[in-house]
Amino acid sequence: MNIQKQGAGFDFSAAITQLFRTQDGKFFAKRLWFWASAAYAIAMLVTFPFIIKYYPDLLEANWHNMKAMMDGRTPDNMALLAILPKMLPSYLFLMVSMLAIGAAVETALHRKVLFNEEEQGVPLRFGAVQLRVLLAQLAVWIIWFLVYTIGVVVLALFIAALASAVPILGIIIGVVGFIALMCLLVFLPISLAPAAALTVNNNRLQVMGARKVSKGIFWNLLGAYLVVVIGGYILIYVVMTIGVIVVTGDTAFLEALSGMGAENPKIAFEAAAERFKNPLVMLMGIIAIFAYAGAYAAYTLSISGISSYTVKWWRGNDEASQFD
């Protein structure tokens, strides 16, 4: 059982391992991870057949474009533009499904950490609370995108206006402005990161209010998120690589998927599809998807855990400050 001490300092290790520090500890963590993994895997398996049939042509078109760019030629995007609309409905369904599952998973963790509440049986639900969490998540990234877009446009206008009149000033403004914009784009999502957990804590949508939670602990949060994001990326990439190699039997398949290989990736994909007709290979493919979903679930839960811990830490300090 982990009790938040009033007035305690921000605990870096507790932040990145909050998933395992609820009152039920590893039992709750394993339970939530299992159901999160299953939900993500099911969403992937449902959409996989609808997306996969267009992949050979998509990979081939992308490969031709990559070769054209490397040869200094203008890529022909017509083939890509003809394929993408066919895949869009399935991708949209997958994206919405993953976002909804993510909101349900994050809400379950926040409720357990902040109130020691959990659903019996399957811990994932989607209702008004989960919808608010989803809106808080989306709002943070919409704000980030708007700041990025407006910042790039304003910076480009300033540079263009100064470039003809005072070139050196245009260069200075460009460099300083670019650095300032990059710093802002890092600061913004970190300062608003506790929005979803604060939404659960206050039982109402919170976005800009998250700044009071993250105030004064930016570097702590940045370090925690960097550790989890980098570690999660490595875990997901390793699991995906092993899964692809086991299923396709081709160590160069990932290079083919990127469009950077010497061979047309459509050939490699068709060879993998032929292997997939074997029931054993198909079973390994399903297991690989569940493994990938498990890695992704561990990553998202660790990310959400930082937000949970931050709000719990802030709440403890905020209560303590009343007696200062």
Image (cartoon, grey):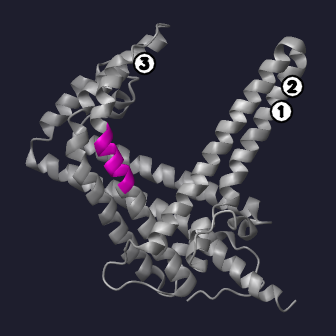
Q: Are marks 1 and 2 in contact (CB under 8 Å)?
A: yes
At label 2, counting other C-alpha atoms closer than 10 Å, the crowd grade (few under 14, some 14-19, many 20 or more) is few
Going 28% across and 44% down the picture, which residue do you hit?
90
Choose mark 3 or mark 1, whichever is in front.
1
Mainly helix, strand or loop, the magenta region?
helix
Amino acid type of the residue that numbered disc 3 sits on in the rendered structure: Met
**Left or right for 287, reference 166:** left
Q: Say what secondary structure mark 3 lies in.
A: helix
The label on residue 172 is 2
Vertical order, 24 against 154 (above or below): below
Amino acid type of the residue that numbered disc 2 sits on in the rendered structure: Ile
Q: Is residue 288 visible?
A: no
Amino acid type of the residue that numbered disc 1 sits on in the rendered structure: Val
Residue 123 pos. (x, y %): 37, 78
Going 47% across and 74% down the picture, which residue do you hit?
129
For the residue pair 2 and 143, the one nearer the viewer reads as: 143
Q: Are marks 3 and 2 in contact (CB under 8 Å)?
A: no
Q: Earlier in the sequence, mark 3 or mark 1?
A: 3
> Which residue range is magenta in the image?
88-96
Q: Is residue 13 visible?
A: yes
Residue under pointer 3:
66
Residue under pointer 1:
176
Residue 88 pos. (x, y %): 32, 39
Residue 324 pos. (x, y %): 88, 89
Vertical order, 322 against 141 (above or below): below
Q: Say what secondary structure mark 1 lies in.
A: helix
